[in-house]
Image (cartoon, rainbow, N blue to C red):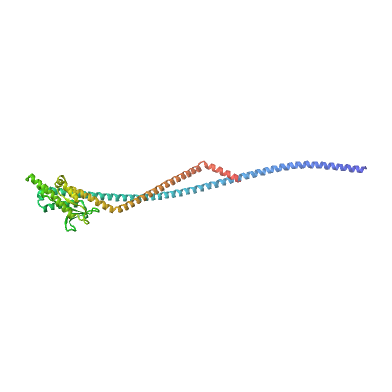
């Protein structure tokens, strides 16, 4: 190899070494530069991140403050709305309770008025019934007084009944007094003429099947006085007793023949003896005459027994009149039963309404207690919990 070639090779080697050294130095400088650049970038990024972190924290605090303000405003708005709703509900409940109270009072007043009206009607009818009974008792007492006055003013039955006209007049007067005081005016007639031309002292008109009953007030008394004549002897009194028995049978036949008319009167008639002593004498010592009268369907009565008969007849008449009016009574009772049924139904409905109103009031009170409890919770420390919950929600959204 020539020197020039050697020199060229040395130069090439030196250049290669220089390039190698430069490459090594550039690589080391580049590493240092990279490290410096990394450090610079890290510091710059750390500074930038700190600024951004502070900005984010500032924005976060501002957002939380605004969110807290909005939550407070919403809470106040909700509280105001709730208070207005409670006030409206309270006013509506008050109006409903007032209307319900007025309705209940009105219904109770109506029911009370109807009950008082029915009670007043019942008391009025009861008072009228008692007044009628007292009036009839007063009439009976007055009749008894008249009878007592009539009996006390009789000087002597023997003197009064000395002839047939006086005897008939006394019997008719006593019979009229008894009948007028015991029966209504349309149930009797005095001196009534029958279809056979005879005149009966009194004709009673009773409901079927009894019909019209004739009452005779004349009686044979002459032989009765002879029976008790102290001046007469025993044979005369015995003969007068037999004659009295014959007079009684004859009088029974006359009554049966004149006053028992088929199709016109009842199948029986009444022979009125206005003296209790005569009646007692007939039934005590002349039972065969009483049996004979019963066979002829002639009933012998005294003032006392006639009063019993007339009292029975009055009860029959009253029963007939009651039966005639029974449909009216049944209708009245039916209407009263319907009224009481409607009263019961309305009372049951009123009880249900009152019970429902009571349950509604209890429900409203329960809701009011719950709302009041929520208000107490909102106004107490629970507001802090709401703020914390709102803040946590805002962070989670960001």
Residue at 86% in and 42% down: 14
Residue 144 appears in the figure: no
Q: Nearer the viewer, residue 227 or 68?
A: 227
Q: How many marks?
A: 0
* Residue 318 horizontal/vertical position (percent): 25, 51
Q: Nearer the viewer, residue 206 or 101?
A: 206
Quadrant of the rendered structure where residue 235 is?
top left
Q: In the orientation shown, which residue stands out farthest toward the left?
A: 231
Residue 334 appears in the figure: yes
* Residue 373 horizontal/vertical position (percent): 48, 43
Residue 263 located left or right of residue 239: right
* Residue 100 horizontal/vertical position (percent): 40, 49
Residue 251 located left or right of residue 91: left
User: Which of the image's four quarters has the N terminus?
Assistant: top right
Q: In the orientation shown, which residue stands out farthest toward the right?
A: 2
Residue 353 located left or right of residue 59: left
Residue 391 located left or right of residue 276: right
Residue at 44% in and 50% down: 92
* Residue 126 horizontal/vertical position (percent): 27, 49
Q: Nearer the viewer, residue 85 or 178?
A: 178
Residue at 55% in and 43% down: 387
């Amino acid at each position: 190899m020539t020197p020039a070639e050697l020199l060229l090779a040395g130069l090439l080697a030196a250049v290669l070494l220089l390039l190698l050294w430069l490459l090594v130095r550039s690589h080391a400088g580049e590493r240092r530069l990279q490290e410096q650049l990394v450090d610079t970038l890290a510091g710059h990024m750390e500074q930038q991140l700190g600024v951004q972190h502070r900005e984010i924290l500032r924005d976060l605090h501002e957002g939380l403050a605004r969110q807290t303000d909005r939550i407070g405003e919403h809470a106040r708005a909700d509280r105001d709305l709730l208070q207005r709703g409670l006030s409206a509900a309270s006013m509506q409940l008050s109006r409903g309770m007032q209307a319900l109270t007025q309705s209940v009072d009105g219904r109770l007043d109506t029911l009370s008025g109807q009950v008082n009206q029915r009670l007043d009607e019942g008391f009025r009818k009861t008072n009228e019934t008692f007044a009628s009974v007292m009036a009839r008792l007063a009439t009976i007492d007055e009749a008894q007084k008249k009878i007592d006055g009539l009996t006390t003013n009789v000087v002597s039955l023997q003197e009064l009944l000395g002839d047939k006209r006086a005897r008939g007049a006394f019997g008719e007067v006593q019979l009229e007094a008894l009948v007028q005081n015991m029966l209504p005016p349309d149930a009797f007639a005095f001196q009534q003429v029958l279809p056979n031309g005879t005149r009966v002292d009194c004709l009673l008109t009773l409901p079927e099947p009894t019909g019209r009953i004739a009452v005779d007030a004349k009686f044979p008394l002459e032989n009765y006085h002879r029976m008790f004549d102290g001046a007469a002897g025993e044979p005369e009194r015995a003969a007068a007793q037999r004659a009295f028995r014959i007079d009684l049978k004859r009088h029974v036949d006359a009554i049966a023949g004149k006053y028992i008319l088929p199709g016109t009167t009842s199948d029986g008639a009444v022979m009125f003896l206005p003296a209790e002593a005569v009646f007692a004498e007939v039934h005590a010592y002349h039972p065969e005459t009483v049996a004979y009268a019963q066979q002829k369907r002639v009933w012998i009565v005294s003032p006392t027994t006639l009063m019993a008969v007339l009292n029975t007849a009055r009860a029959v008449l009253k029963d007939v009149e009651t039966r005639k009016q029974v449909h009216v009574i049944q209708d009245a009772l039916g209407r009263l039963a319907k009224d009481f049924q409607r009263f019961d139904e309305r009372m049951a409905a009123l009880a249900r309404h009152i019970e429902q109103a009571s349950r509604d009031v209890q429900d409203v009170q329960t809701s009011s207690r719950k709302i009041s409890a929520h208000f107490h919770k909102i106004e107490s420390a629970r507001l802090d919990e709401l703020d914390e919950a709102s803040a946590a929600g805002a962070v989670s959204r960001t």
